[in-house]
């Protein structure tokens, strides 16, 4: 009878071990949930970026307006008989 409480405590600890430290423990489940949330966040950002790129591709395929805009902004191209004016802002002196 003296060993019965010690045996029961040992059995309870043995049963609790997988719950807290084992392969499917609460700590690992929490860690995997954190990783899942981070991955979902990354996927959402990438989906938004992909949607923007898809819209750009459609614009470039369908119309010449997007092509003209890119040529003007990125390459500085102008149409014939068109005058281009570039206004530079004064730079503030660095302290």
Image (cartoon, rainbow, N blue to C red):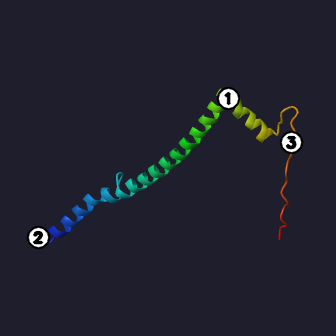
- Where residue 84 sits, quadrant-wise, is top right
Element type where label 1 sits in the image: loop
At x 77% / y 41%, what residue is drawn? Answer: 73
Does the residue at mark 3 contact the one at mark 1 (Cβ under 8 Å)? no
The answer to which of 40 and 47 lies nearer the viewer is: 47
44 versus 59 height, above or below: below
Does the residue at mark 3 contact the one at mark 2 (Cβ under 8 Å)? no
The answer to which of 42 and 47 lies nearer the viewer is: 47
The answer to which of 43 and 72 lies nearer the viewer is: 72
For disc 1, the marked residue is: 63
Q: Earlier in the sequence, mark 1 or mark 2?
A: 2
For disc 2, the marked residue is: 1
**Residue farthest to the top?**
62
- Residue 39 image position (x, y, % from top left): 49, 48
- Residue 18 image position (x, y, % from top left): 31, 56
Please tell me whether mark 1 or mark 2 is closer to you in this view: 1
For disc 3, the marked residue is: 84
The disc placed on residue 9 is none
Label 2, residues with CA under 10 Å away: few <14, some 14-19, many ≥20: few
13 versus 50 height, above or below: below
Element type where label 3 sits in the image: loop
Element type where label 2 sits in the image: loop
At x 47% / y 47%, what residue is drawn? Answer: 40
62 versus 17 height, above or below: above
Q: Please identify the quadrant where the C terminus is shown.
A: bottom right
* Spatial separation of the CA atoms under disc 1 and disc 2: 89 Å
- Where residue 56 sits, quadrant-wise, is top right
The answer to which of 5 and 33 lies nearer the viewer is: 33
């Amino acid at each position: 009878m003296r060993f019965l409480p010690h045996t029961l405590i040992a059995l309870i600890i043995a049963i609790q071990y997988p719950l807290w430290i084992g392969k499917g423990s609460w700590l690992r489940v929490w860690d995997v949930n954190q990783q899942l949330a981070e991955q979902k966040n990354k996927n959402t950002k990438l989906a938004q970026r992909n949607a923007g790129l898809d819209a750009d591709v459609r614009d470039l395929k369908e119309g010449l307006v997007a092509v003209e805009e890119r040529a003007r902004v990125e390459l500085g191209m102008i149409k014939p008989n068109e005058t281009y004016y570039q206004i530079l802002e004064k730079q503030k002196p660095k302290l």
